[in-house]
Amino acid sequence: EAEVAQSPRYKITEKSQAVAFWCDPISGHATLYWYRQILGQGPELLVQFQDESVVDDSQLPKDRFSAERLKGVDSTLKIQPAELGDSAMYLCASSRRGMQFFGPGTRLTVL
Amino acid sequence: EDQVTQSPEALRLQEGESSSLNCSYTVSGLRGLFWYRQDPGKGPEFLFTLYSAGEEKEKERLKATLTKKESFLHITAPKPEDSATYLCAVLHPRNTDKLIFGTGTRLQVFP
């Protein structure tokens, strides 16, 4: 069964450092999402791509976060510089016909 | 404001003790409601999609129902392996590829 792949699974960094997360969606899924999930809360959408175009990045802190999906397939989310409050689970999802499927996530800890 | 509220926040059940989780929503013109299961440290796993009031879906010990204001996830004779956080989400009324999540119900089932 096809799955959304993410790497790394865990990342520990110091504040002010740069971090990057990678996501490979399910083959054929044109829509890709990055979510942030703080412990004890539901996922919050950061950015949504349709193919290589950004559809919604209204909740993305653009002063430090960036996301790209250059060829409309895999995607990278970057944080520079990381802050203590960025510690969270970063989830990638892809969808087809309105059904979203999530990857395993990247647990980020900022020290 | 478009919002999803789940209750209770946490639920402890004895194995075999049936119960229900609630998801209430305030969005105009519901286009779809989703239930996900999330195990600690993992991404959400899709369970059900409901589209119209009166609709019901079942999977093993789980049954999801939908009214015009809320959805219930009924768990019949739960087992310890049903322990997880259950997330409810609705499609955004103006961006139907975007999900608005609740904060989840953390379920623990004891033998």
Image (cartoon, helix red, strand yellow):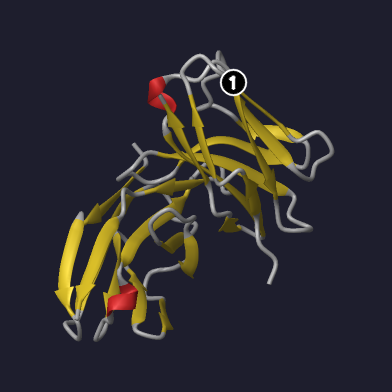
Residue sitting nearer the eye, A107 or B27:
A107
A79 w.r.t. B34: above or below: above
Which residue corresponds to the image point at 38% horizontal and 24% vertical from the top-left? A85
Horizontal side of B70 relative to A50 (left or right) equals left
x and y percentages locating residue B84 in the rendered image: 33, 64
- Between B8 and A103, the one nearer to me in the picture: A103
- Judge whether A36 appears above or below B64 on screen: above
Image quarter hosting the C terminus of chain A: top left
Q: Residue at x 25, y 65 (%)?
A: B107
Taking B44 as reference, is B77 left or right? left
Chain of the residue on which disc 1 is drawn: A
Q: Position of residue A71 (x, y in %)?
A: 84, 38
Residue at (49% x, 57% y) in the render: B31
Instruction: Name the amino acid, label 1.
Output: Ala
Viewer-nearest residue: B50 or A61: A61
* Left or right of A17 in this view: B30: left
Horizontal side of residue B14 vs A77, given as left or right: left
Report the residue marked by disc 1. Answer: A18
Give B64 or B95, whichever is nearer the viewer. Answer: B64
State the residue at coordinates (65%, 56%). Answer: A4
How busy is the neighbourhood of tag 1: few (under 14 within 10 Å), some, or many (20 plus)?
A: some
Q: Position of residue B73 (x, y in %)?
A: 31, 71
Q: Count every numbered label the image shows and give the total.
A: 1
The quadrant holding residue B15 is: bottom left
Question: Image quadrant of residue A63?
Answer: top right
- Label 1: which secondary element: loop
Q: Quadrant of residue A52?
A: top right
On screen, residue A64 above or below B68: above
Measuring from the top left, give residue B56's x and y in whole percent.
Answer: 40, 78
Where the N terminus of chain A falls, by quadrant? bottom right
